[in-house]
Amino acid sequence: QKEVEQNSGPLSVPEGAIASLNCTYSDQGSQSFFWYRQYSGKSPELIMFIYSNGDKEDGRFTAQLNKASQYVSLLIRDSQPSDSATYLCAVNIEGGTSYGKLTFGQGTILTVHP
Amino acid sequence: NAGVMQNPRHLVRRRGQEARLRCSPMKGHSHVYWYRQLPEEGLKFMVYLQKENIIDESGMPKERFSAEFPKEGPSILRIQQVVRGDSAAYFCASSPNTNIQYFGAGTRLSVL
């Protein structure tokens, strides 16, 4: 069983729609959860992080965390073609706030078409 | 405040040569992490360092790979006697005293 799982996609949504990206993790001790965006040939760019159960909103992005279900998601409202990228879910498997080793999912390819 | 700086951006080596990848963390960041991204694969943790110390090298191959983060200067990821399977993008990330990591632009290593 993979430690962090994502659907590889591609996920295709029309411009202006809500894109929903999902991620599950296996280690119940996981403490911190991150979403990175990676354009082709570029480096990962941090877009959201969440530590507590519930929702966290930042502009068009909302991260949702459910530790009981070991599930974290990212919603992108009013999707734009410039949102087309690979979205990486990352989890701090070791726990704690100062350790930092991240385990990544395979990434979900998102395509937003005009 | 400059971001995480990696160089070179692209590195070409022949089989058997050595590759040295450098990473300067963001100002004020004392935690450095190296990750590798093989073609069509996800990011994999390699090593975590603080100044002059290797904290966790559980993701490093046992042979040919080494890393350091000296008191002065950048962190170095060194690959000796490179093989074609080492061709990948190598990313460095840095962090202040939290676990939010910011990535550099990466070094794309090609082994001929």
Image: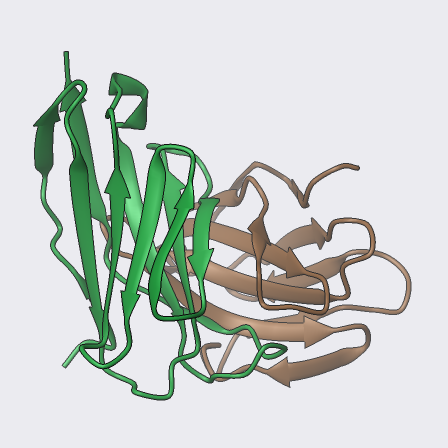
- Quarter of the picture containing the C terminus of chain B is top left
Query: Which corner quadrant of the image does residue B55 belong to?
Result: bottom right
Task: Determine whether B110 is above or below B57 in the image.
Answer: above
> Chain B takes which shade in the image?
brown
- Quarter of the picture containing the N terminus of chain B is top right
Query: Which corner quadrant of the image does residue A11 belong to?
Result: top left
Residue A57 percent location from the top left of the image: 40, 46
At a point 89% along the width and 69% down the height, the residue shown is B71
Residue A98 seen from this side: yes
Residue B112 seen from this side: no
Task: Determine whether B19 is above or below B44 in the image.
Answer: above
Q: Which chain is green?
A: A
Residue B11 percent location from the top left of the image: 54, 41
Residue B85 shown left or right of residue B57 in the figure: left
Task: Determine whether B3 is above or below A24 in the image.
Answer: above
Residue A109 percent location from the top left of the image: 19, 40
Residue B46 shown left or right of residue A69 in the figure: right
At a point 55% along the width and 73% down the height, the residue shown is A100
Q: Extreme front residue here?
A: A54
Task: Determine whether B46 is above or below A90 in the image.
Answer: below
Depth order, front residue of B94/B74 = B94
Q: Extreme top residue here?
A: A114
Residue B23 percent location from the top left of the image: 69, 52
At a point 16% along the width and 28% down the height, the residue shown is A111
Residue B77 shown left or right of residue B51 in the figure: left
